[in-house]
Image (cartoon, grey):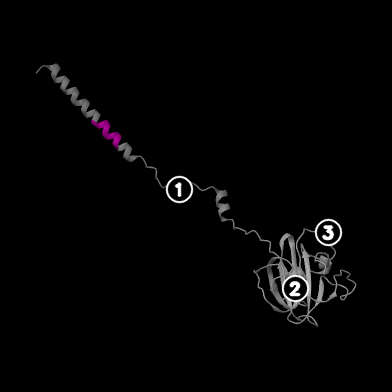
């Protein structure tokens, strides 16, 4: 074998050895490098932590005043805001009971006897009390001093009507009633004689029922 052939084979062997060493060193370097954790947590910003730990405060809800409390408002809060009946929305009314009118509407607050936020109708014990307009019963009970067994009906366009001193209540809260529907019986609860005390309110303020009821 010539010297040149031997030299070539020797150089090829050295090259293979060098390539093998370089490959092994690269593999070692890759295994030695620290691997980034897939589940490594990101740093939490301070303002976000403070915001998360901040206690939640509930927004206070505005409670709606019970309907029987509207009827019981102090006269000084209600009667100073007299409503002009001619400017009120139109609604069809019927008389709530048959009988003699014994007391008229009066806002003259000179004495307890002169003040009357509705009208009073004398009647026979057990006679029908009718809904003065179509609406929904929002109160039926006896929790209001001086009114006895009381019904309050909510009507369209901001009106309420109240029926007091009843002997028997025939409707319950949530019931829908038609104008002229029998809803109670005349009594004397909270009164000295059988009668109906009848009130109409607009936006919580008393108005004269005779100004909206049909003539009879």
What residue sits right under mark 1 in the picture? 41
User: Looking at the picture, does residue 5 appear above or below residue 94?
Assistant: above
Indicate the position of residue 124 as horizontal and vertical percent values.
77, 81
Foreground of the two, 98 or 175: 98
Position of the C terminus, as image quadrant, is bottom right
Please report whichever mark, 2 or 3, sits nearer to the chain's N-terminal start: 3
Instruction: Identify the element where label 2 is drawn.
Output: strand
User: Looking at the picture, does residue 50 appear above or below residue 208?
Assistant: above
Position of 16 with respect to 152 (left or right) is left
Indicate the position of residue 4 as horizontal and vertical percent values.
14, 16
Cβ–Cβ under 8 Å for marks 2 and 3: no
Residue at position x 56%, y 54% in the image: 52
Q: Quadrant of residue 182?
A: bottom right
Instruction: Identify the element where label 3 is drawn.
Output: helix
Please report whichever mark, 3 or 1, sits nearer to the chain's N-terminal start: 1
Disc on res. 163:
2
Q: Nearer the viewer, mark 2 or mark 1?
A: 2
Cβ–Cβ under 8 Å for marks 3 and 1: no
List the single residue furthest toward the left. 1
What residue sits right under mark 3 in the picture? 86
Foreground of the two, 5 or 210: 210
User: Looking at the picture, does residue 55 appear above or below residue 39?
Assistant: below
Indicate the position of residue 193 as horizontal and vertical percent values.
80, 82
How far is mark 2 from mark 3, CA to CA? 24 Å
Position of the N terminus, as image quadrant, is top left
List the single residue furthest toward the right. 110
Residue at position x 19%, y 24% in the image: 12
Task: State the extent of the magenta-drawn residues as a range.
Answer: 20-27
Indicate the position of residue 90 as horizontal and vertical percent values.
77, 59
Total numbered labels placed on residues in the image: 3
- Circle 3 Cα neighbour tier, 10 Å, few/some/many (<14 / 14–19 / ≥20): few
- As for residue 144 lying within the magenta part, the answer is no
């Amino acid at each position: 074998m010539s010297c040149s052939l031997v030299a070539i084979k020797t150089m090829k062997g050295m090259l293979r050895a060098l390539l093998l060493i370089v490959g092994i060193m690269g593999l070692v370097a890759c295994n030695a490098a620290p691997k980034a954790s897939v589940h490594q947590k990101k740093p939490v910003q301070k303002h976000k932590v403070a915001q998360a730990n901040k206690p939640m405060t509930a927004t206070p809800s505005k409670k709606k005043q019970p309907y029987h409390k509207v009827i019981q408002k102090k006269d000084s809060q209600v009667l100073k805001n007299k409503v002009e009946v001619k400017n009120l929305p139109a609604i069809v009314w019927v008389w709530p009971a048959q009988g003699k009118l014994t007391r008229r509407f009066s806002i003259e607050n000179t004495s307890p006897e002169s003040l009357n936020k509705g009208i009073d109708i004398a009647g026979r014990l057990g006679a029908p009390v009718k809904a003065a307009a179509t609406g929904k019963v929002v109160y039926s009970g006896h929790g209001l001093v001086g009114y006895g067994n009381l019904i309050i009906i909510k009507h369209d366009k901001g009106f309420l009507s109240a029926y007091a001193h009843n002997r028997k209540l025939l409707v319950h809260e949530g019931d829908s009633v038609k104008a002229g529907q029998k809803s109670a019986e005349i009594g004397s609860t909270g009164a000295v004689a059988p009668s109906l005390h009848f009130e109409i309110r607009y936006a919580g303020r008393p108005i004269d029922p005779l100004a909206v009821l049909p003539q009879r």
